Image (tube, helix red, strand yellow):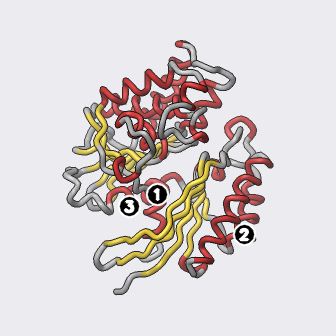
Amino acid sequence: MSSTRVAAVDCGTNSIRLLITELDPAAGRARDLDRRMQIVRLGQDVDRTGRLAPEALERTFKACREYAAVIADYGVAPERTRFVATSASRDAENSAEFAEGVREIIGVSPEVVSGDEEAQLAFTGATQGLAGSGAAAPYLVFDLGGGSTEFVLGADSVRAARSVDIGSVRLTERHFAGTEVPTAAQIAAAEADIAAGLNRAAEVVPLDAAATLVGLAGTVTTVAAIALGLPDYDSALIHHSRLSLTRVREVTERLLGAGHAERAAIPGLHPGRVDVIAAGALVLRSIMERTGAAELLVSEHDILDGIAWSLVR
C-alpha cells in the first residue's frame, strides 16, 4: 500500500496541536510534513465553572483558523482529517458551542473522545516507534495532560487503561492559584489529590507491572529538556531520552521553589507552561514514585500520532 497523507488535530486542556504526515501502514513508517503547537488554555476555569470561557474559545478558534489554512495548503481532504478533543471539552456544559465553531473552521466535527479511547490513541502513538529504542515490553504509557492523565498498560496491544482527572492546569487552578511560590501546605494538598487519582488508576491498571515506563506530553518533555540542560527546546534530543527519578526530583524541587520570573527564564520552557509546569512536575514525580520506576523513557510521539494512525487503520 502506498503512503497516505493525513491531518490530525489534538485539542487538549492547555494546548492545541496539528500534525500533517504521510503514513505507510504496510511498512509502519511515518514521514512528518508539519508538526506545530499553540498554547490556548481551552480548559481555563472549567474545573471551577463547568463551562468553556468565551476568551478561551476565541483563542482556540484563532488557532483553528491557522490550522485550517495549513491543512488546505497540504491538500489534505476532510475524510483524511481527524480532530480529537479531550479533557476540557469532555467536562464543559457548552461543548456544543465549541463543536460548532470547529466544524465551521476546520470542516470536520470534533470528536470528544472518552478517557479510555484517549488512552488507546496515546498508547498507539507512543509505542509505534519503540522498536529499536531498547525499551522492553510490557510498557506503562502515561499521557500527562492539562486536565487529565491517561495510563495504559500493554505490549503489542492494550491490556488495561484508565483516565483520571489529574493534570497540570487542573491542579494549578485547584491548589496553586494566586500563589507565586506554593507553600508546603499547598504542595501537600496537591500531592493528596494526585495520590487519590493514582489510586483510581490503580483500580484498573497495575501501575507496577511494566518493564518500561513511557511518559508523554508537554510536562514530561519540558521537564526532560530542563533535566538535559538544553539551551533551547530540541525535540530530536528529547525523543527517547531517559530521565532518572533523581533528576525528576531535582527539577521538581527547583520548579516548586521558583517564582514566575525564575521559571520564565528557564531555557526551553514555553511561556504558556510557565504557570502550570510546577504542578505538572509534581504529578510526574508522584507517578514515578508510585510505579517504582528508577527511570522514564520520554516520547515526543503521543496521542497526536495515534490520531494520525487511526485514519489509516
In which quadrant of the rendered image does the C terminus lie? bottom left
Q: Which secondary structure, mark 1?
A: helix
User: Left of 297 or right of it: where is 94?
Assistant: right
Instruction: Give the secondary structure at mark 3.
Output: helix
Q: Local crowd at mark 1 within 10 Å, few (<14), some, or many (≥20)?
A: many
Report how far apart the C-alphas of labels 1 and 2 lie in the structure: 22 Å
Res. 301 image quadrant: bottom left
Q: For this view, does 308 lie left or right of residue 127?
A: right
Badge 3 amino acid = Thr
Q: Is residue 123 left or right of residue 183?
A: left
User: In the rendered image, is residue 202 in sight?
Assistant: no
| C-alpha gap between disc 3 and disc 2 | 28 Å
Amino acid type, callout 2: Ile
The residue identified by callout 3 is: 124
Question: To which residue does mark 2 refer?
Answer: 105
Q: CA distance from mark 1 to mark 3?
A: 7 Å
Q: Quadrant of the N terminus?
A: bottom left
Disc ID at residue 156? none
How many C-alpha atoms fall within 10 Å of the one at disc 2: few (<14), some, or many (≥20)?
some
For this orientation, the residue located farthest to the right is: 54
